[in-house]
Amino acid sequence: MTDPVTVTDIRRARERFDPEIVRETPVERSRSLSAMSGADVRLKMEHLQRTGSFKTRGASTKVAAVAAAGDADRVVAASAGNHAQGVALAAANADIPATVVMPADAPQAKVDATRGYGAEVILHGRTFQQAVARARDIADHPAAVFVHAYDDPAIVAGQGTLGLEVAEQVPDLDTVIVPVGGGGLIAGVATALAAVAPEVRVVGVQAADAATVPDSLAKGAPVDREETRTIADGIATGGVADLTFDAIERHVDEVVTVSDDEIAHAILTLLGRAKQLVEGAGAASVAALCSGDLDVSGETVVPLLCGGNIDMSMLDTVLEHAMTDRDQLLRLRVRIEDEPGELSTLSTVLADRGANVRHVRHDRAVEDLRVGEAYLVFEVAAAGREHATRLMEAIRERDYEVARVN
């Protein structure tokens, strides 16, 4: 059995790239992640593509083929956001109108960027699969071509160019970690590496609440998932295709899953240590690296940072969650006598110990309070676990009952 996509197809896709659309992204060593993992970690900065995602590679390959054929007056796609931007940009470059269907709750930043590249955007459904169904309906006439996000040999070939780049940029590569949604990226990367660097271990990573590949591999055929819940919307496709599943089965060595908590931690780690802002899908590879489930000690490892289009509201949510986990954001509930001066006293205790009070509220209508009592709930920015402990001890020293409620 031969691969439907070969390394020759991938090389041809690379030769045809317009450098104004697809760039060769850099690789940078991360000392912090290397120290955390015991490996030599090199980050592949694919989030620095013009559209902020690897999806531009596959989209430009497919749209260029459509333009060369000359028999289509429109391309139609479905996407949670990154494929949408890739198709919109490639279509604008080829002077072909584009229509993109996106889930109704797609990140606003990705919707705005897709429109900014000139595509018509239709919001439909709650899932990627529902958006695909609507897009196929729109494309159901001879003059339109549906550009699938991953179930297309041209798309897989375009994504596979990333594998060629990594092999050239990191000749001593031992393991590459690839985020997996529909499988287009890992199918292309694994196919390329199987040809040019077969000794390299290819590891796929999925968000646990959107993982379909482990079940698919166990069953021996693609398994879909109707509901996906993850902050990594770029890999929440709900399934893989026969095309991508076959490549995964043949060329991928291992597939692991990570939780949203681990992804959030990875986003914050990349922001704080590597100074790189990535979205959930882009951080999944680093989440896998830091999870402890992969033995990479002594290896040269490349996690693919495949996307950087994080919505600002999601970034705020992730930062708040991660800061809470690191004891840098506390909600402290203090039981007080509901009398003048109590708020001032407690605010002074916190301020004297270097805590910044972000919000405060009184709770009086609480069942376990006696008449004349109240709770003061402080949201406090702290420096970390030791600082948080000192703050609570200082409040208790004033004979207040205090509890952490986040």
Image (cartoon, rainbow, N blue to C red):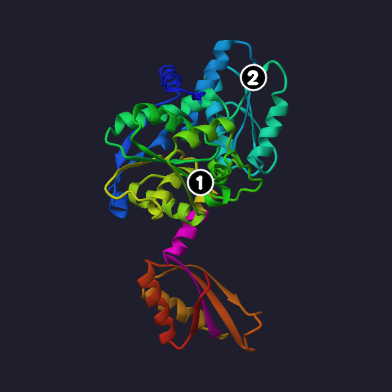
Q: Is residue 14 magenta?
A: no
Q: Is residue 345 left or right of residue 127?
A: left
Instruction: Name the spot of residue 280 as percent of width and height, x first.
Output: 49, 46
Q: Residue at x 50, y 83 (%)?
A: 341
Label 2, secondary structure: give it.
strand
Q: Is residue 354 visible?
A: no
The disc, 1 or 2, on the residue closer to the chain's N-terminal end is 2
Q: Give amino acid for label 1.
A: Gln
Instruction: Name the spot of residue 300 as percent of width and height, x first.
Output: 29, 42
Give residue 381's quadrant in the image. bottom left
- In the picture, the disc for residue 74 is 2
Residues marked 1 and 2 touching at CB (< 8 Å): no
Q: Is residue 395 above or below residue 197?
A: below
Q: Residue at x 54, y 40 (%)?
A: 181
Q: Nearer the viewer, mark 1 or mark 2?
A: 1
Q: Residue at x 37, y 31 (%)?
A: 25
Instruction: Name the spot of residue 256 as percent of width and height, x first.
Output: 47, 48
Instruction: Report the span colored magenta.
Output: 317-336
Q: Is residue 331 magenta?
A: yes
Instruction: Please name the residue that numbered disc 1 is placed on.
Output: 206
Q: Give amino acid for label 2.
A: Arg
Viewer-proximal residue among 113 and 3: 3
Disc 2 crowd, CA 10 A, few/some/many (<14, 14-19, 20+): some
The residue at the far front in this view is 1
Viewer-proximal residue among 52 and 187: 187
Q: Is residue 210 above or below residue 1?
A: below
Q: CA distance from mark 1 to mark 2?
A: 33 Å
Q: Is residue 118 above or below residue 238?
A: above
Disc 1 crowd, CA 10 A, few/some/many (<14, 14-19, 20+): many
